């Protein structure tokens, strides 16, 4: 896979690659395959391991530069305080451009104008996507849509006497995106999607999931990507 180095900290030996697939991949200096140090903006080729790390990272010659079809003058700058040795949990700050001024991820800027139907549409467009991250608005708007549709189905069942068939079909049709957006919401607070299984613990499990679903986006790049929303 090809991409471009968004940031590299020689002090910590950690960096982030913005890949041609639109995702961010953390890497460490141990995976850098050249004698010269990696620098922000450098085009690279790399592989991805099972944990989502970039491995076997090799810098490309100028003639092999690629176009990722998006602005690449921005980089993710590390914050020294709280910085860890694990690149998937390293505390990264705002997206900044080469001049050090605040910049906005295009997706974040577009989503600032999203309404109810936009968020529902986004969740449905990620019908079975269990990767990436989802902010609170995406999760809760989709959950609200699910409740409204279910109640609408229940009313139809009552009116025509179908004994819950319509409501059941609606729930069945939305079960996959419902789980998927829940998994992405957990990713956005640095939790594995497998934590959804805690719901099987009576009372306590449900309360813990509710707290996580209500928790704000964590301001760090992790193995599931960049924060789901712009943070102050």
Image (tube, rainbow, N blue to C red):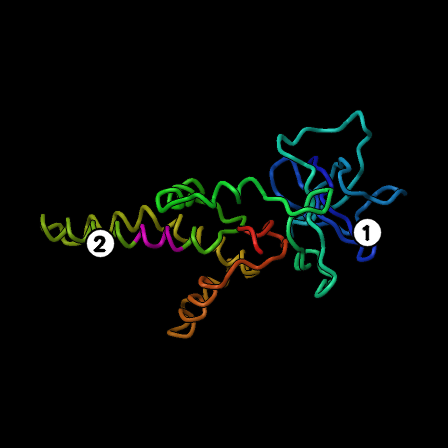
The stretch in magenta equals 140-146
Sort mark 2 into few (<14), some (14-19) or many (20+) by Cα contacts within 10 Å: some
Outermost right residue: 35
Q: Nearer the viewer, residue 232 or 165?
A: 232
Q: Using the image, determine if residue 99 lies above or below residue 210.
A: above
Q: Position of residue 137 (x, y in %)?
A: 43, 53
Side of 50 where 112 appears, left or right:
left
Local secondary structure at mark 1: helix
Local secondary structure at mark 2: helix
Of circles 2 and 1, which is in front? 2
Residue drawn 47% across and 46% down?
A: 112
Q: Nearer the viewer, residue 18 or 231?
A: 231
- As for residue 163 lying within the magenta part, the answer is no
Q: Nearer the viewer, residue 228 or 209?
A: 228
Residue placed under numbered mark 1 in the picture: 30
Distance from the alpha carbon under mark 2 to that under mark 1: 54 Å
Q: Position of residue 8 (x, y in %)?
A: 77, 49
Residue placed under numbered mark 2 in the picture: 151
To which quarter of the image does residue 46 belong? top right
């Amino acid at each position: 896979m090809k991409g471009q180095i968004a940031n590299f900290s020689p002090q910590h030996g950690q960096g982030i690659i913005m890949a041609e697939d639109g995702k961010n991949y953390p890497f460490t200096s141990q995976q850098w395959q050249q004698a010269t140090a990696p620098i922000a903006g450098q085009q690279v080729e790399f592989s991805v391991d099972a944990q989502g790390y970039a491995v076997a990272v090799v810098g490309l010659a100028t003639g092999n530069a690629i176009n990722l079809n998006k602005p690449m003058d921005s980089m993710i700058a590390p914050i020294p305080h709280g910085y860890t040795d694990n690149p998937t949990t390293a505390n990264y700050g705002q997206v900044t451009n080469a001049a050090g001024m605040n910049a906005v991820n295009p997706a974040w800027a577009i989503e600032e104008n999203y309404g109810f139907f936009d968020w529902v549409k986004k969740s449905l467009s990620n019908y079975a996507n269990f990767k990436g991250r989802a902010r609170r608005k995406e999760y809760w708007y989709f959950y609200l849509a699910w409740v409204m549709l279910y109640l609408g189905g229940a009313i139809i069942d009552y009116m025509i006497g179908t004994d819950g068939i319509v409501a059941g079909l609606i729930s069945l049709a939305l079960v996959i995106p419902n789980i998927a957006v829940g998994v992405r919401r957990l990713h956005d607070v640095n939790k594995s999607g497998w934590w959804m299984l805690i719901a099987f613990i009576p009372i306590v499990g449900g309360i813990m999931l509710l707290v996580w679903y209500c928790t704000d986006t964590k301001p760090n790049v992790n193995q599931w990507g960049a924060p789901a929303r712009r943070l102050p």
